[in-house]
């Protein structure tokens, strides 16, 4: 009986320890800021990546891509390798989109962390020399 109890305790400890251990290695946190400009339109995005502990995720290989959730297969936007900006954990690339509207921008991360994250953004028309921030799409907005 005592043996069973100890086994159960150890099992419980293993189960509860698992999530925090996974979080330590865990998924990076992404903040994605994009601006559109010009014809295309072009979309310049800066992915700001942090580890779970809040420190910048440096030395990662980051690739940005985009697709239109409402038009699967309709677009073939070339994925672009994002370059470090000089600010730790920040990576930037410019995508050539084919139309305005809601785009899912995908952030592919490898190196110290491996993950694929995406954000749905509304890419607005931007006239002349302006640069216009892409805004978060509402849930279900396409
Ligand atoms: Cu489209």
Image (cartoon, rainbow, N blue to C red):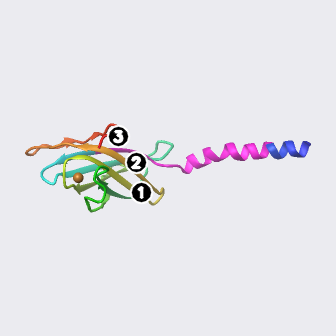
Relative side of 30 to 69, left or right: right
What segment carries the magenta color?
9-33
At horizontal 35% and vertical 46% (from top left) the residue drawn is 119
Gap in angstroms between the C-alphas marked 3 and 2: 25 Å
Q: Which label lies toward us, 1 or 2? A: 1
Q: Earlier in the sequence, mark 1 or mark 3?
A: 1
Q: Quadrant of the C terminus?
A: top left
Q: Secondary structure at mark 2?
A: strand
Does residue 117 sit above or below 78 in this rendering? above
**Disc ID at residue 49:** 2
Q: Which label lies toward us, 3 or 2? A: 3
Q: Earlier in the sequence, mark 1 or mark 2?
A: 2
Residue extending furthest toward the right: 1
Q: Position of residue 140 (x, y in %)?
A: 35, 40
The reply to whether discs 1 and 2 touch (Cβ–Cβ < 8 Å) is yes
Gap in angstroms between the C-alphas marked 1 and 3: 25 Å
Q: Quadrant of residue 125?
A: top left
Q: Which residue is mark 3?
A: 140
Q: Earlier in the sequence, mark 3 or mark 2?
A: 2
In this view of the protein, can residue 99 be seen by the observer? yes
Label 3 Cα crowd, 10 Å radius (few <14 / some 14-19 / many 20+): few
Q: Which residue is mark 1?
A: 109
């Amino acid at each position: 009986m005592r043996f069973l109890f100890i086994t159960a305790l150890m099992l419980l400890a293993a189960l509860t320890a698992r999530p925090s251990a996974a979080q330590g290695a865990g998924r990076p946190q992404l903040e994605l800021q994009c601006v559109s400009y010009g014809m295309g339109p072009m979309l310049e995005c800066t992915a700001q990546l942090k580890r779970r502990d809040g420190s910048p995720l440096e030395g990662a290989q980051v690739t940005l891509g985009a697709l239109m959730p409402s038009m699967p297969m309709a677009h073939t936007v070339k994925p672009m390798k994002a370059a470090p900006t000089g600010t730790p954990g920040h990576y930037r690339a410019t995508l050539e989109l084919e139309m305005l509207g809601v785009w899912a921008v995908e952030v592919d991360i490898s190196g110290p962390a491996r993950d694929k994250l995406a954000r749905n953004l509304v890419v607005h028309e931007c006239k002349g020399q302006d640069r216009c921030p892409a805004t978060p799409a509402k849930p279900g907005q396409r």
